[in-house]
Protein backbone atom coordinates (compact mmCIF):
# COMPACT_ATOMS: atom_id res chain seq x y z
CA UNK A 1 0.00 0.00 0.00
CA UNK A 2 0.93 3.63 -0.44
CA UNK A 3 0.39 7.08 1.05
CA UNK A 4 -3.36 7.10 0.43
CA UNK A 5 -3.88 3.87 2.36
CA UNK A 6 -1.58 5.01 5.15
CA UNK A 7 -3.62 8.21 5.50
CA UNK A 8 -6.71 6.04 5.98
CA UNK A 9 -5.32 4.24 9.03
CA UNK A 10 -3.54 7.23 10.54
CA UNK A 11 -6.23 7.86 13.22
CA UNK A 12 -6.00 4.18 14.17
CA UNK A 13 -2.23 4.34 14.57
CA UNK A 14 -2.33 7.58 16.56
CA UNK A 15 -4.89 6.16 18.99
CA UNK A 16 -2.64 3.38 20.32
CA UNK A 17 -0.58 4.91 23.10
CA UNK A 18 0.82 1.49 24.04
CA UNK A 19 2.11 0.78 20.52
CA UNK A 20 5.87 0.20 20.71
CA UNK A 21 6.65 -1.73 17.50
CA UNK A 22 5.56 -0.74 14.00
CA UNK A 23 6.62 -2.29 10.70
CA UNK A 24 5.51 -0.95 7.32
CA UNK A 25 8.43 -2.43 5.39
CA UNK A 26 7.95 -3.53 1.78
CA UNK A 27 5.24 -0.98 0.93
CA UNK A 28 5.28 2.22 -1.18
CA UNK A 29 4.70 4.98 1.35
CA UNK A 30 7.56 7.23 0.04
CA UNK A 31 8.45 10.59 1.65
CA UNK A 32 4.85 11.72 2.15
CA UNK A 33 4.14 8.51 4.04
CA UNK A 34 7.23 9.09 6.19
CA UNK A 35 5.85 12.54 7.05
CA UNK A 36 2.59 10.91 8.14
CA UNK A 37 4.45 8.39 10.31
CA UNK A 38 6.36 11.28 11.88
CA UNK A 39 2.95 12.57 13.03
CA UNK A 40 2.36 9.18 14.65
CA UNK A 41 5.75 9.43 16.37
CA UNK A 42 4.72 12.85 17.70
CA UNK A 43 1.89 11.21 19.67
CA UNK A 44 3.05 7.62 20.28
CA UNK A 45 6.36 6.51 21.79
CA UNK A 46 7.24 3.80 19.28
CA UNK A 47 10.42 1.89 20.15
CA UNK A 48 10.93 -0.26 17.05
CA UNK A 49 10.26 1.15 13.58
CA UNK A 50 10.88 -0.72 10.32
CA UNK A 51 10.73 1.29 7.08
CA UNK A 52 12.79 -0.96 4.80
CA UNK A 53 11.91 -0.95 1.08
CA UNK A 54 9.57 2.06 0.97
CA UNK A 55 11.10 4.56 -1.52
CA UNK A 56 12.02 6.98 1.27
CA UNK A 57 14.83 9.51 0.76
CA UNK A 58 16.36 12.38 2.77
CA UNK A 59 13.11 14.39 3.00
CA UNK A 60 11.16 11.57 4.62
CA UNK A 61 14.07 10.45 6.77
CA UNK A 62 14.46 14.00 8.15
CA UNK A 63 10.80 14.03 9.19
CA UNK A 64 11.15 10.73 11.04
CA UNK A 65 14.38 11.65 12.84
CA UNK A 66 13.19 15.14 13.83
CA UNK A 67 9.82 13.99 15.18
CA UNK A 68 9.02 14.69 18.82
CA UNK A 69 9.42 11.10 20.06
CA UNK A 70 12.22 9.94 17.74
CA UNK A 71 14.53 10.02 20.74
CA UNK A 72 12.65 7.02 22.17
CA UNK A 73 13.38 4.80 19.15
CA UNK A 74 15.60 1.86 20.10
CA UNK A 75 15.51 0.11 16.69
CA UNK A 76 15.35 1.76 13.28
CA UNK A 77 15.44 -0.20 10.00
CA UNK A 78 15.70 1.98 6.88
CA UNK A 79 17.55 -0.16 4.33
CA UNK A 80 16.74 -0.57 0.62
CA UNK A 81 14.89 2.70 0.20
CA UNK A 82 15.78 5.29 -2.48
CA UNK A 83 19.45 5.21 -3.48
CA UNK A 84 21.28 6.44 -0.42
CA UNK A 85 23.64 9.41 -0.57
CA UNK A 86 25.76 11.66 1.61
CA UNK A 87 22.74 13.76 2.60
CA UNK A 88 20.93 10.74 4.09
CA UNK A 89 24.07 9.57 5.90
CA UNK A 90 24.57 13.07 7.33
CA UNK A 91 21.00 13.00 8.69
CA UNK A 92 21.57 9.64 10.37
CA UNK A 93 24.98 10.68 11.74
CA UNK A 94 23.52 13.84 13.28
CA UNK A 95 20.80 11.77 14.93
CA UNK A 96 23.28 9.23 16.32
CA UNK A 97 25.48 11.96 17.78
CA UNK A 98 22.63 13.46 19.84
CA UNK A 99 22.95 12.94 23.57
CA UNK A 100 19.21 12.25 23.88
CA UNK A 101 18.94 9.31 21.47
CA UNK A 102 17.97 5.83 22.78
CA UNK A 103 18.82 4.00 19.55
CA UNK A 104 20.45 0.58 19.99
CA UNK A 105 19.95 -1.01 16.56
CA UNK A 106 20.31 0.61 13.13
CA UNK A 107 19.95 -1.04 9.74
CA UNK A 108 20.96 1.05 6.73
CA UNK A 109 22.18 0.75 3.14
CA UNK A 110 20.87 -0.67 -0.12
CA UNK A 111 21.47 -3.87 -2.06
CA UNK A 112 21.21 -1.82 -5.26
CA UNK A 113 24.33 0.24 -4.69
CA UNK A 114 27.73 0.20 -3.03
CA UNK A 115 27.76 1.54 0.53
CA UNK A 116 30.72 3.91 0.50
CA UNK A 117 33.44 3.55 3.10
CA UNK A 118 33.38 7.31 3.76
CA UNK A 119 29.71 6.91 4.83
CA UNK A 120 30.72 4.09 7.15
CA UNK A 121 33.36 6.37 8.66
CA UNK A 122 30.80 9.13 9.24
CA UNK A 123 28.47 6.77 11.06
CA UNK A 124 31.30 5.45 13.23
CA UNK A 125 32.51 8.97 14.00
CA UNK A 126 29.01 9.84 15.21
CA UNK A 127 29.23 6.93 17.68
CA UNK A 128 32.21 8.37 19.54
CA UNK A 129 29.94 10.17 21.99
CA UNK A 130 26.96 7.84 21.64
CA UNK A 131 26.32 5.65 24.68
CA UNK A 132 23.35 3.55 23.50
CA UNK A 133 24.13 1.93 20.13
CA UNK A 134 24.94 -1.76 20.35
CA UNK A 135 24.46 -3.02 16.78
CA UNK A 136 24.66 -1.50 13.30
CA UNK A 137 23.80 -3.51 10.18
CA UNK A 138 25.00 -2.30 6.79
CA UNK A 139 23.76 -3.82 3.54
CA UNK A 140 25.38 -3.21 0.17
CA UNK A 141 28.99 -2.87 1.32
CA UNK A 142 31.87 -4.08 -0.85
CA UNK A 143 31.88 -7.34 1.11
CA UNK A 144 28.12 -7.78 1.36
CA UNK A 145 26.11 -7.34 4.59
CA UNK A 146 28.12 -6.32 7.65
CA UNK A 147 26.90 -6.53 11.25
CA UNK A 148 28.79 -4.42 13.78
CA UNK A 149 28.39 -5.01 17.51
CA UNK A 150 29.55 -2.25 19.84
CA UNK A 151 30.28 -3.00 23.49
CA UNK A 152 31.08 -0.53 26.25
CA UNK A 153 34.66 -1.83 26.29
CA UNK A 154 35.06 -1.09 22.58
CA UNK A 155 33.52 2.33 23.09
CA UNK A 156 36.40 3.23 25.43
CA UNK A 157 38.87 2.83 22.58
CA UNK A 158 36.79 3.70 19.53
CA UNK A 159 39.82 4.49 17.35
CA UNK A 160 41.27 1.00 17.75
CA UNK A 161 37.83 -0.52 17.29
CA UNK A 162 37.40 1.49 14.09
CA UNK A 163 40.63 0.00 12.77
CA UNK A 164 39.26 -3.46 13.54
CA UNK A 165 36.00 -2.59 11.82
CA UNK A 166 37.84 -1.58 8.67
CA UNK A 167 38.92 -5.19 8.31
CA UNK A 168 35.28 -5.85 7.43
CA UNK A 169 36.02 -3.86 4.28
CA UNK A 170 39.28 -5.72 3.66
CA UNK A 171 41.41 -2.83 4.92
CA UNK A 172 44.27 -3.56 7.34
CA UNK A 173 45.52 -0.43 9.11
CA UNK A 174 48.73 0.59 10.79
CA UNK A 175 47.54 2.31 13.97
CA UNK A 176 50.01 1.45 16.69
CA UNK A 177 50.15 5.16 17.44
CA UNK A 178 46.40 5.42 17.92
CA UNK A 179 45.41 6.80 14.53
CA UNK A 180 42.55 9.25 14.50
CA UNK A 181 39.36 7.89 12.95
CA UNK A 182 39.76 10.36 10.08
CA UNK A 183 43.22 8.94 9.35
CA UNK A 184 42.47 5.22 9.36
CA UNK A 185 42.32 4.86 5.58
CA UNK A 186 45.39 7.10 5.29
CA UNK A 187 47.28 4.61 7.45
CA UNK A 188 46.07 1.45 5.65
CA UNK A 189 48.99 -0.82 4.79
CA UNK A 190 47.05 -3.65 3.15
CA UNK A 191 43.79 -3.83 1.20
CA UNK A 192 42.66 -7.33 0.35
CA UNK A 193 39.26 -7.99 -1.16
CA UNK A 194 37.84 -11.53 -1.12
CA UNK A 195 37.90 -14.01 -3.96
CA UNK A 196 34.74 -14.01 -6.10
CA UNK A 197 34.00 -10.35 -5.34
CA UNK A 198 31.23 -9.12 -7.64
CA UNK A 199 32.89 -5.90 -8.80
CA UNK A 200 30.97 -3.41 -10.92
CA UNK A 201 31.78 0.15 -12.01
CA UNK A 202 30.20 1.66 -8.88
CA UNK A 203 32.32 -0.53 -6.58
CA UNK A 204 35.46 0.15 -8.62
CA UNK A 205 34.91 3.90 -8.24
CA UNK A 206 34.54 3.41 -4.49
CA UNK A 207 37.80 1.45 -4.28
CA UNK A 208 39.50 4.14 -6.40
CA UNK A 209 38.37 6.83 -3.95
CA UNK A 210 39.72 4.77 -1.06
CA UNK A 211 43.07 4.33 -2.82
CA UNK A 212 43.29 8.07 -3.41
CA UNK A 213 43.31 8.59 0.38
CA UNK A 214 45.94 5.97 1.18
CA UNK A 215 49.40 7.16 2.23
CA UNK A 216 51.04 3.95 3.50
CA UNK A 217 49.54 1.21 1.31
CA UNK A 218 52.01 -1.55 0.46
CA UNK A 219 49.79 -4.48 -0.58
CA UNK A 220 46.68 -4.50 -2.78
CA UNK A 221 44.80 -7.69 -3.69
CA UNK A 222 41.88 -7.76 -6.16
CA UNK A 223 42.11 -11.41 -7.11
CA UNK A 224 39.14 -13.32 -8.48
CA UNK A 225 36.41 -10.94 -9.63
CA UNK A 226 33.31 -12.72 -10.92
CA UNK A 227 33.05 -11.26 -14.38
CA UNK A 228 35.49 -9.35 -16.54
CA UNK A 229 37.37 -6.47 -14.97
CA UNK A 230 36.81 -4.19 -17.96
CA UNK A 231 38.66 -1.15 -19.24
CA UNK A 232 36.32 1.41 -17.67
CA UNK A 233 36.48 -0.39 -14.32
CA UNK A 234 40.29 -0.46 -14.36
CA UNK A 235 40.39 3.27 -15.11
CA UNK A 236 38.10 3.86 -12.11
CA UNK A 237 40.37 1.73 -9.94
CA UNK A 238 43.80 2.99 -10.90
CA UNK A 239 43.68 6.17 -12.97
CA UNK A 240 40.57 8.27 -12.28
CA UNK A 241 41.68 9.48 -8.82
CA UNK A 242 45.45 9.32 -9.39
CA UNK A 243 48.29 9.93 -9.18
CA UNK A 244 48.36 7.88 -6.01
CA UNK A 245 50.82 8.56 -3.22
CA UNK A 246 51.72 5.33 -1.44
CA UNK A 247 54.70 2.89 -1.57
CA UNK A 248 52.97 -0.07 -3.25
CA UNK A 249 55.09 -3.23 -3.16
CA UNK A 250 52.64 -6.01 -4.01
CA UNK A 251 49.75 -6.01 -6.51
CA UNK A 252 47.52 -9.03 -7.22
CA UNK A 253 45.14 -8.72 -10.20
CA UNK A 254 44.84 -12.44 -10.85
CA UNK A 255 41.75 -14.20 -12.24
CA UNK A 256 39.88 -11.10 -13.45
CA UNK A 257 39.31 -12.16 -17.08
CA UNK A 258 40.93 -9.08 -18.62
CA UNK A 259 43.05 -9.02 -21.77
CA UNK A 260 45.69 -7.01 -23.58
CA UNK A 261 43.48 -3.95 -24.09
CA UNK A 262 42.75 -3.67 -20.37
CA UNK A 263 46.40 -4.25 -19.47
CA UNK A 264 47.41 -1.44 -21.85
CA UNK A 265 45.02 0.87 -19.99
CA UNK A 266 46.77 0.45 -16.64
CA UNK A 267 50.33 0.31 -17.99
CA UNK A 268 51.13 3.89 -16.83
CA UNK A 269 49.93 2.95 -13.35
CA UNK A 270 52.17 -0.14 -13.24
CA UNK A 271 55.22 1.73 -14.58
CA UNK A 272 54.86 4.44 -11.96
CA UNK A 273 55.50 2.14 -8.97
CA UNK A 274 59.27 1.95 -8.50
CA UNK A 275 58.88 0.02 -5.22
CA UNK A 276 56.68 -2.68 -6.80
CA UNK A 277 58.39 -6.05 -6.37
CA UNK A 278 55.49 -8.52 -6.64
CA UNK A 279 52.93 -8.55 -9.47
CA UNK A 280 50.36 -11.23 -10.26
CA UNK A 281 48.16 -11.21 -13.36
CA UNK A 282 47.65 -14.99 -13.38
CA UNK A 283 44.45 -16.43 -14.77
CA UNK A 284 43.74 -13.60 -17.22
CA UNK A 285 43.85 -13.46 -21.04
CA UNK A 286 46.78 -11.16 -21.78
CA UNK A 287 48.44 -13.50 -24.39
CA UNK A 288 51.85 -12.81 -26.04
CA UNK A 289 51.14 -9.12 -26.63
CA UNK A 290 50.42 -8.70 -22.89
Image (tube, rainbow, N blue to C red):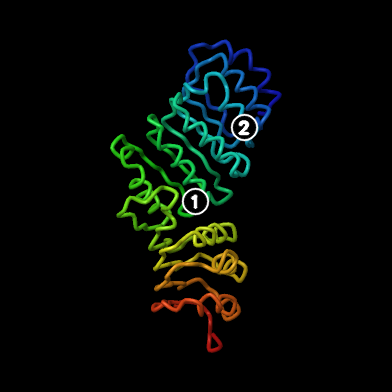
Q: How many other residues sit within 10 Å of disc 1, few (<14), some (14-19) or many (≥20)? A: some
List x then y, in percent, for residue 53.
Answer: 59, 37
Quadrant placement of the N terminus = top right
Q: Residue at x 31, y 53 (%)?
A: 177
Given this view, does label 1 or label 2 mark the residue nearer the observer? 1
List x then y, in percent, for residue 12.
Answer: 60, 13
Q: How many other residues sit within 10 Å of disc 2, few (<14), some (14-19) or many (≥20)? A: some
Residue 156 is left or right of residue 92, and the answer is left
Q: CA distance from mark 1 to mark 2?
A: 29 Å
Q: Residue at x 44, y 26 (%)?
A: 99
| Label 1: element kind | helix
List x then y, in percent, for residue 109.
Answer: 53, 43
Q: Quadrant of residue 8?
A: top right
Return the disc, 1 or 2, that comes first in the chain's sequence.
Answer: 2
| Mark sitting on residue 27 | 2
| Label 2: element kind | loop
In front of the other: 2 or 51:
51
Q: Quadrant of residue 128?
A: top left
Q: Quadrant of residue 79?
A: top right
Q: In the rendered view, would you say 147 is above or below 254?
A: above
Quadrant placement of the C terminus = bottom right
Q: In the rendered view, would you say 133 is above or below 209?
A: above
Q: Residue at x 36, y 46 (%)?
A: 159
Q: In the rendered view, would you say 161 is above or below 198?
A: above
Which residue carries the number 1 mark? 117
List x then y, in percent, for residue 193.
Answer: 43, 61
Amino acid sequence: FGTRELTTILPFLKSWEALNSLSVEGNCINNRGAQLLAEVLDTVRIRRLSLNRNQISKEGLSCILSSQNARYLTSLMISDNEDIGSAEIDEIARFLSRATTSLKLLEVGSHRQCFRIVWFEKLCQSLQNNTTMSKMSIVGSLHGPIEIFISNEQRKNMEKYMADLMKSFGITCCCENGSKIDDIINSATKIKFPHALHLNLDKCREIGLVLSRCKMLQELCLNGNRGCLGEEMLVALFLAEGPYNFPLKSLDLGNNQFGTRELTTILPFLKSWEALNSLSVEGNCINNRG
